[in-house]
Image (cartoon, helix red, strand yellow):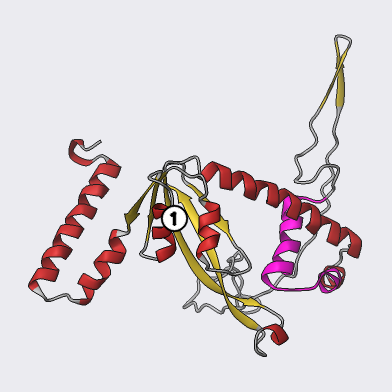
Amino acid sequence: GGKTAPTKDVYPEGMEGMPPFSTRDSVRYLMIPPRFIKEVTHVHTVKDDGSLFSGRVPAAPLVNSSYDGSFIAGIAQLRYLYSMPVERIVAYFRENGFDLDKQTAHGLLKKTAWLLDNLHRAMRCAVKEDRYICCDETYHKVLVKAEDNGGKGSRKGYVWVMVAVHLGLCYFFYDEGSRREEVILRELEGYAGTIQSDGLSSYKKVAALSEGRILRLSCLQHCKRDFVDMKGNPDADGVLSLANELYENEHRHRIGVDGWT
């Protein structure tokens, strides 16, 4: 993996450019530490017919900030994906030629969290405007205090997702890793439309408590799994054949084959 650098040609000393009798490739992997680039933009103001017109300053995620989105994303990646304390991030940057004040780093992360929090709330509202959404949840190991978790420093935490099928939007949400039904009941409170999910009882309860506002559809792929496990049984194979035919027709419908719209 990685980016491929331009190739080099090496000849015996004093024989450069002669037709080679044979060629073999020698591979070396190089590592380039993080590079920090100072980009200066001259924003000009022009006077024309008594009026002043100024060029636009390049967009940045934070108002009156000199830090580009790539810079902020780099800090966030180190802090939250690789669990590096801010002090260590600052030291890492310094070792690679960029002096960043610790308070500045904390400020960038705090302001970015505020922006993402607003975006997260907006995404929640947008997804629930779709009248057909799919729901699911999955787990990931999260770090916790060992003294609060029977001596273990990690536990299984759940992340939920709602996909707005027509809008093509995804909304992920997390409540301290909880998989309790209260989490999805709260997120879908007031929703009216169709949800599609696996057979988790929480989703069934969402529909049951909606007073008819929500229709729940089962996931055909989950239903299909048990028949796949029984492959070879004539009845199971018949069901699989029908399911596959449905998938094939759905695909034709999506891509518009043979007059399908």
Who is closer to the viewer here, 63 or 136? 136
Where is 249 relative to 181, above or below? above
Residue extent of the magenta highlight:
67-90
Who is closer to the viewer here, 63 or 36? 63
Q: Quadrant of the C terminus?
A: top left
* Number of marks: 1
Q: Position of residue 223 (x, y in %)?
A: 27, 65
The quadrant in which residue 16 appears is: bottom right
Write the residue at 72% across / 81% down.
145
The answer to whether residue 99 is seen in the rendering is no
Q: Is residue 69 magenta?
A: yes
Q: Position of residue 181 (x, y in %)?
A: 50, 64
Where is 59 relative to 90, above or below? above
- Mark 1, secondary structure of its residue: helix
Q: Is residue 33 magenta?
A: no
From the image, tell me which residue sits under label 1: 206
Q: Position of residue 21 (x, y in %)?
A: 47, 77
Q: Quadrant of the N terminus?
A: bottom right
Who is closer to the viewer here, 85 or 121? 121
Write the residue at 59% across / 65% down.
3
The answer to whether residue 42 is seen in the rendering is yes
Please, what is the three-letter code of the amino acid marked with disc 1?
Answer: Val
Who is closer to the viewer here, 88 or 243? 243
Write the residue at 85% across / 33% down.
43
Q: Is residue 134 left or right of residue 102?
A: left
Q: Is residue 206 left or right of residue 126?
A: left
Where is 22 relative to 46, above or below? below
In the image, farthest residue toward the top: 49
**Magenta stretch, overall SS:** helix
Q: Is residue 78 left or right of residue 5?
A: right
Local crowd size for mark 1, using a 10 Å CA cut-off: few (<14), some (14–19), many (≥20) = many
